[in-house]
Amino acid sequence: MSNPKATHQSPYWDQTPNRRAKVAKKKKWIQGAIKKPGALHKALGVSPKRKLSPGELMIKSGDTTLMKRRKNLARTLRGLKKRG
């Protein structure tokens, strides 16, 4: 007996489960992105309760790679909050 999936040529048949998995991963990317909550506030010396200003989220020439990534993520999350 042959496998009907192997002989079927429809792209929908072969790729539907993979697409669902990719969509599920994209929906929950934020949970994996925030590894150390409050680390940016602590590094900037700001109270965790205070909202960061756009000037504080600007990337400066002396920032480390990790600091640049944290600032970029903070700007991205701020933009998501405005849309919602």
Image (cartoon, grey):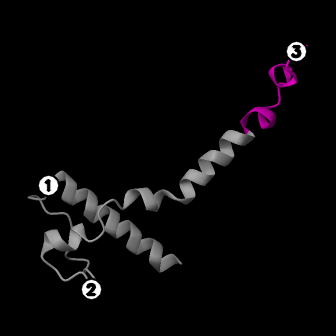
Relative height, residue 37 to residue 65 (above, below): below
The picture places residue 2, in percent across and down from the top left corner, at 88, 15
Quarter of the image that includes the N terminus: top right
Q: Mark 2 and mark 3: span between their CA atoms?
A: 62 Å
From the image, state whether disc 1 or disc 2 is nearer to you: 2
Q: Is residue 51 left or right of residue 67?
A: right
Q: Is residue 72 left or right of residue 83?
A: left
The picture places residue 18, in percent across and down from the top left corner, at 66, 40
Circle 1/circle 3 CB separation < 8 Å: no
Give the numbered dot on residue 10: none
Q: State which region is magenta.
A: 1-15
Q: Residue at x 20, y 77 (%)?
A: 55
SS for dot 1: loop
Residue under numbered circle 3: 2
Amino acid tagged 1: Thr
Relative height, residue 3 to residue 33 (above, below): above
Residue under numbered circle 1: 64
Relative height, residue 23 to residue 77 (above, below): above
Circle 2/circle 3 CB separation < 8 Å: no
The quarter holding residue 41 reads bottom left
From the image, state whether disc 1 or disc 3 is nearer to you: 3
In primary-sequence order, the first of circles 2 and 3 is 3
Crowding near the residue tagged with mark 3, few <14, some 14–19, many ≥20 C-alpha atoms within 10 Å: few
Amino acid tagged 3: Ser
Relative to the observer, which residue lies in front, 29 or 68?
29
Residue 79 lies in the magenta stretch? no
Residue 2 lies in the magenta stretch? yes
Residue under numbered circle 2: 49
